[in-house]
């Protein structure tokens, strides 16, 4: 339902901005789900938005980030705040790639503290002038949220630093986690001030807001939600040390689309989902999807790019050109190596300086006085003890290098540890012969991309510098293999930053490489960077988010869980899928006279987690009650062997049993076992068993289950990733060696099974129903309950069988799956407790009815 606050807030802004006649109300939108379309005032639009600059947008995207793309400055004389757009903000630059006609609203916090009495006034001003919704966090909450949980716990962990001792990272603090959730909740409140959940898209950015998807999904089950992580995602071995690992994973999975810069980051996330939550994923037509409670959560892998126009604009500034000339004059006759990094422990600044020292030591005669490293350090984003240590180490290393290898007119290393304006950084990029990014662990890191663009230059800049337009450009990159942009820069020299000697060799190779080769490397990089810019990234994510959300109104959604801490999630199922009501089925049960009841065993009447698989006295009792009604034909249809089932259900004299997916069928305890006539030759077992034994020996935790008609390889106790990999390999292996055998090889949940062709639960249901029809006892009531993939065959078979012309009148069908999940069944029950409760309800209804002639089908009548 559309948000009234959305319409009211934006309408208020619109009326303040333009004094124009109200636009006639547009046609009402068509209802796609049950509900009430809220009454909007005449000036509001049907999607709850109002665009004062153009006609009604066909879509709106709400971009949520920790910080708004704004600069804030206070006038010391008047005390008033002045704001301007931050042209270097990624969330602002990405707007250029979004579809034309898209309205963008930003939600985030400001970089300054605003006193409470002015917050409302400033919020109105920012919405009117910049379409920004500020989230105001009080200083204590901001400290615990950002400098506490984000920077001291998430940031180190996501960069592979474990808090093993207090000197190297803070241990988990529950109060900081509570602050993180509280801050995320405030962001959610701001989103819901402007969102129309039916139409708007929400795009959340980075690890600061990983709790936000759950908070939004909880309040609007069908919200169109994308999330992009700009930092690395650690391996499962690292991530699983986080005490709130489940809550964060489940929150991210409440998104429709989750984006990562590289395949490695996505692979680690998927591995965490598999190992921690037990989820499976698969790739379909190039898209990776995770099935999560009926929803498909898509995974996107695409590195972000730079804003070409912004860089080229700054390159053309006179101050930039003058600075380039100044740098060229200052380092004339020298090879300039450039480093631009934040001052933190993960950027590898000290390792880079050690590599420069090794370069001077190892190639002193060749590079003495000819090579200079200029290291620009951006202001630290936090002021922890680790940052101070990194700064002290950097300064002491620079001092040592310059003392040993420098001279009065030559300093091998120039460390600039102060804020540097953008035009000056751009000038250094344009003038540098080589750029090195030596981070030990980093997200995307756009420094190499910016360097390539600046080395390409512009027509105006080249003209000002006296460079011939047609002359070839060159650039050289030395990049750590642990940064996100490394895979996309195939022409760069990749290094392990921990190997100081190799980094030194790479630097020497970079500054001495022949010009033609540097030209080729530069051209290759520039083609990629210019085509995969920030607009391309934003447009691609937008398109995939739209695709991921296209089926939102084809499913019925409801929430489970009370909040973030309890793993709130949304169940999305078919519109006709609903819980099976005992009253509803008992009513049909009472008015029918020939009933077929098919029950799976494991996961249906017996919990999967139960150690003892013997049926309880309660189950035996209710089955005997149902079987004692002459109107009922009751069958247990299971994949288990006939010996186990015969022993377990010995007290049930008239209970039918279909064992091993129907290869063996018995209509009652006194009847003989009927064997499937489709398969009598089991010579294929001599081929399958050695192959399965080979995989069992090489896969710890796996085992072979031998049935009379089938062989099953289980790997649920093996390592999830290795077990899955081995199962896929085993499946391919068996399909190749059994190509000419009358068997089928199927992969199920943690199993690979080989069984005769034509044996399935679906065929069992078809056979039993047909037998009842042939005996003149066509059923008018069919109940089928199961919980796994093999039971889906039964559900499908029953529907197709009763549609056969031999059925004069369609029976009442109750196909029911156990658990809330996508199914071919029309109904569901929550668990085995619900199943037994339902069976007791039916048994009680039988005991209230007068007994009639036995209408069950005997085995002899169908033999």
Image (spheres, rainbow, N blue to C red):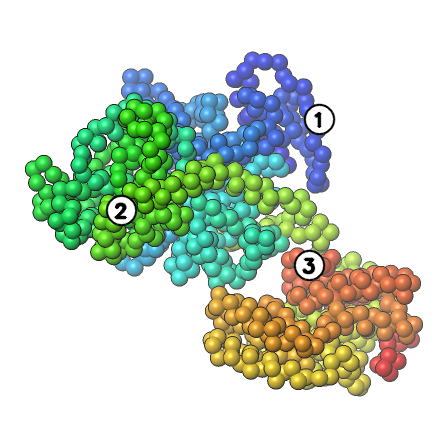
Q: Where is residue 134 in the image (x, y as percent from the top left)?
A: 44, 31
Q: Where is residue 49 in the image (x, y as percent from the top left)?
A: 59, 28
Residue that numbered label 2 is attached to: 513
The residue drawn where x is 55% and y is 25% is: 10
Q: Position of residue 753 (x, y in %)?
A: 62, 74
Q: Which of 471 and 428 is in front in this view?
A: 471
Secondary structure beneath dot 3 equals loop
Foreground: disc 2 or disc 1 = 2
Q: Where is residue 745 in the image (x, y as percent from the top left)?
A: 64, 72
The residue drawn where x is 13% and y is 49% is: 364
Q: Distance between the residues labelled 3 and 2?
A: 62 Å
Residue that numbered label 1 is attached to: 27
Relative horizontal placement of residue 821, taking residue 215 as reference (left or right): right
Name the residue furthest left: 408
Specify the quadrant that holds the C terminus: bottom right
In this orientation, does residue 445 appear? no
Secondary structure beneath dot 2 equals loop
Secondary structure beneath dot 1 equals loop
Residue that numbered label 3 is attached to: 823
């Amino acid at each position: 339902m559309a948000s009234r606050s959305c319409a009211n807030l934006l309408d208020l802004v619109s009326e303040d901005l333009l004094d124009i006649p109200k636009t006639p109300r547009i046609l009402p939108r068509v209802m796609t789900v049950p509900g009430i379309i809220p009454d909007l005032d005449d000036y509001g639009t049907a999607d709850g938005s109002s665009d004062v600059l153009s006609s009604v947008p066909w879509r709106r995207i709400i971009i949520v980030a920790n910080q708004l793309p704004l600069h804030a400055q206070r006038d010391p004389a008047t005390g008033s705040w002045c704001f301007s757009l931050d042209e270097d903000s990624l969330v602002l630059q990405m707007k250029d790639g979004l579809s034309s006609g898209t309205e963008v609203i930003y939600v985030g916090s400001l970089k300054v503290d605003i006193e409470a009495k002015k917050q409302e006034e400033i919020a109105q001003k920012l919405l009117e002038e910049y379409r920004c919704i500020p989230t105001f966090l009080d200083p204590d909450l901001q400290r615990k949220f950002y400098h506490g949980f984000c920077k001291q716990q998430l940031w180190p962990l996501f960069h592979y630093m474990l808090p093993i001792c207090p000197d190297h990272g803070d241990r988990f603090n529950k109060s900081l986690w509570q602050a993180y959730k509280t801050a995320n909740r405030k962001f959610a409140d701001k989103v819901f001030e402007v969102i129309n959940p039916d139409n708007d898209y929400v795009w959340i950015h980075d690890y600061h807001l990983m709790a936000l998807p759950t908070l939004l999904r909880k309040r609007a089950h069908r919200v169109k939600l994308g999330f992009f992580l700009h930092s690395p995602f650690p391996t499962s071995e690292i991530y699983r040390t986080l005490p709130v690992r489940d809550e964060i994973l489940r929150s991210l999975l409440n998104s429709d689309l989750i984006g990562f810069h590289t395949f490695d980051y996505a692979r680690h996330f998927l591995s965490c989902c598999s190992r921690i939550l037990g989820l499976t994923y698969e790739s379909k037509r190039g898209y990776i999807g995770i099935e999560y409670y009926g929803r498909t959560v898509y995974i996107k892998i695409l590195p972000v790019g730079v804003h070409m126009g912004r860089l080229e604009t700054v390159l053309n500034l006179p101050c930039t050109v003058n600075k380039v000339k100044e740098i060229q004059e200052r380092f004339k006759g020298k090879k300039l190596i450039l480093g631009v990094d934040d001052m933190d422990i993960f950027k590898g600044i000290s390792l880079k300086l050690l590599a420069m020292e090794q370069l001077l030591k190892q190639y002193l005669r060749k590079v003495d006085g000819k090579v200079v490293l200029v290291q620009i350090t951006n202001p630290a984003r936090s002021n922890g003890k680790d940052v101070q240590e990194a700064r002290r180490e950097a300064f002491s290393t620079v001092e040592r290098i310059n003392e040993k290898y420098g001279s009065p007119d030559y300093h091998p290393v120039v460390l600039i540890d102060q804020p540097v304006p953008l035009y000056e950084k751009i000038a250094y990029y344009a003038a540098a012969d080589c750029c090195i990014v030596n981070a030990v662990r980093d997200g995307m890191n756009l420094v190499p991309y910016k360097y390539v663009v600046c080395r390409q230059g512009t027509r105006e800049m080249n003209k000002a510098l006296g460079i011939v337009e047609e002359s070839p450009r060159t650039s050289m990159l030395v990049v750590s293999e642990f940064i996100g942009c490394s895979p996309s820069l195939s022409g760069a020299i990749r290094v392990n930053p921990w190997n100081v000697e190799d980094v030194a060799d790479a630097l020497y190779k970079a500054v001495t490489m022949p010009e033609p080769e540097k030209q080729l490397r530069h051209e290759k990089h520039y083609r990629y960077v210019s085509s995969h810019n920030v607009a391309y990234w934003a447009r691609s994510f937008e398109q995939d988010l739209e695709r991921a959300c296209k089926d939102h109104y084809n499913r019925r959604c409801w929430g489970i869980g009370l909040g973030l801490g309890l793993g709130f999630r949304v169940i999305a199922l078919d519109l006709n899928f609903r819980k099976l009501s005992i009253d509803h089925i008992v009513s049909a049960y009472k008015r029918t006279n020939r009933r077929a009841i098919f029950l799976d065993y494991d996961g249906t009447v017996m919990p999967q987690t139960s150690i003892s698989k013997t049926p309880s006295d309660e189950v035996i009792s209710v089955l005997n009650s149902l079987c004692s009604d002459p109107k009922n034909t009751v069958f247990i249809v299971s994949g288990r062997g006939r010996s186990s089932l015969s022993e377990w259900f010995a007290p049930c004299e008239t209970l039918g049993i279909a064992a091993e997916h129907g290869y063996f069928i018995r209509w009652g305890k006194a009847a003989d076992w009927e064997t499937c006539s489709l398969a009598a030759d089991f010579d294929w077992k001599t081929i399958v068993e050695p192959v399965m034994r080979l995989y069992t020996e090489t896969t710890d935790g796996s085992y072979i289950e031998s049935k009379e008609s089938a062989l099953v390889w289980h790997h649920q106790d093996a390592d999830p990733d290795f077990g899955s990999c081995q199962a896929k390999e085993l499946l391919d292996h068996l399909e190749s060696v059994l190509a000419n055998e009358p068997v089928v090889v199927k992969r199920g949940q943690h199993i690979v099974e080989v069984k005769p062709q034509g044996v399935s639960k679906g065929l069992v249901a078809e056979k039993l129903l047909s037998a009842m029809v042939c005996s003149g006892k066509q059923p008018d009531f069919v109940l089928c309950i199961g919980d796994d993939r093999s039971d889906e065959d039964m559900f499908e078979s029953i529907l197709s069988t009763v549609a056969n012309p031999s059925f004069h009148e369609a029976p009442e069908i109750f196909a029911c799956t156990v658990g809330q999940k996508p199914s071919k069944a029309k109904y569901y029950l929550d668990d085995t407790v619900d199943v037994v409760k339902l069976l007791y309800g039916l048994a009680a209804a039988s005991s209230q009815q007068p007994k009639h002639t036995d209408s069950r089908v005997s085995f002899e009548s169908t033999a």
